[in-house]
Image (spheres, grey):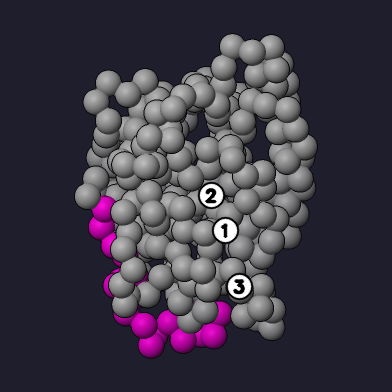
């Protein structure tokens, strides 16, 4: 059964894109067929994947076409590019920032991405990983409405729980009104260190979410920044401690924790 996972947190700087890319890379390493979708107008995931601008459709054109019921005018399969690490992906474009405008008049506008991902071009993937933008808007509700689960990276720092509570509210509304099958796939602690603050946040998150929290935490390390700079996953880096941690997260995902 296909899983569609939104990697989401309305707070920026929590390792969301790093998590999306490395979970995708780890799943590919385990033999799963994976599509990563950059659903953030900033295009950080596209850059991480070494995407270079071309004439093929991005997720922006696809979303607009699905909203206008014109998908038949596009070669939907051509939206998928292929990363050198074996990850299939669909890049973003700055036009996606205007989604609130072109979706405003659409009936059931929260379900446009769900309709798009039901296209046969996406049916062969074991996992679709959606890197969401750090905002509580119509793009996030589209992602959650289309997903089977949400993976929430949480930085173990002050104020992290405030953003979690806001995301929880959106999750609850989407689950109650649009997608009753949506689940919290897992809460992932990121940028963990040995400070008292980090330990206190981790303890509170584990108390609040219980078994939903991954046993593996991602430590704070310059490795993460270097990974985005060289545009290579941590998973692929030899002897990467963070790569090993992300692979352990993937193992937890596949084993149902």
In percent of width and height, residue 222 lies at 44, 27
Q: Which residue is drawn at 53% across and 38% down?
A: 15
Label 2 vs label 1: CA separation?
Answer: 6 Å
Please report whichever mark, 3 or 2, sits nearer to the chain's N-terminal start: 2
Q: Residue at x 63, y 58 (%)?
A: 140
Give yes or no for residue 78 being in the magenta stretch: yes
Contact check, label 2 and label 1, Cβ < 8 Å: yes
In percent of width and height, residue 204 lies at 73, 21
Give yes or no for residue 168 being in the magenta stretch: no
| Stretch in magenta | 66-83
Residue 143, numbered circle: 1
In percent of width and height, residue 220 lies at 51, 24
Give the number of marks: 3
Which element is circle 2 on? strand
Please report whichever mark, 3 or 1, sits nearer to the chain's N-terminal start: 3
3 vs 1, front mark:
3
In percent of width and height, residue 121 lies at 33, 68
Label 3 vs label 2: CA separation?
Answer: 18 Å
The residue pinned by badge 2 equals 6
Q: How crowded is mark 2: few (under 14 residues within 10 Å), some or many (20 or more)?
A: many
Residue 221, numbered circle: none
Q: In this view, does 122 lie to the left or right of 111?
A: left
The residue pinned by badge 3 equals 99
């Amino acid at each position: 059964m296909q899983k569609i996972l939104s990697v989401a947190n309305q707070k920026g700087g929590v390792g969301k894109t790093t998590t999306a890319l490395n979970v995708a890379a780890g799943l590919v390493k385990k033999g799963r067929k994976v599509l990563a979708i950059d659903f953030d107008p900033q295009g950080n995931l596209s850059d991480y994947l070494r995407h270079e601008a071309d004439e093929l459709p991005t997720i922006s054109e696809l979303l607009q076409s699905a909203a206008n019921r014109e998908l038949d005018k596009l070669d939907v399969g051509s939206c998928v590019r292929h990363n050198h690490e074996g990850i299939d992906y669909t890049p973003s474009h700055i036009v996606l920032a205007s989604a609130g405008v072109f979706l405003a008049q659409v009936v059931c506008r929260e379900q446009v991405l769900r309709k798009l991902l039901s296209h046969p071009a996406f049916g062969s993937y074991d996992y679709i990983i959606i890197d969401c933008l750090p905002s509580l808007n119509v793009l996030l509700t589209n992602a959650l409405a289309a997903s089977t689960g949400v993976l929430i990276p949480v930085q173990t720092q002050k104020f992290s729980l405030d953003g979690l509570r806001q995301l929880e509210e959106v999750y609850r509304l989407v689950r109650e009104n649009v997608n009753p099958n949506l689940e919290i796939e897992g809460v992932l602690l990121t940028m963990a260190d040995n400070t008292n603050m980090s330990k206190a946040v981790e303890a509170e998150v584990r108390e609040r979410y219980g078994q939903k929290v991954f046993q593996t935490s991602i430590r704070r390390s310059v490795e993460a920044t270097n990974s985005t700079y060289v545009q290579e996953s941590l998973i692929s880096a030899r002897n990467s401690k963070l790569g090993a941690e992300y692979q352990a997260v993937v193992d937890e995902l596949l084993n149902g924790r």
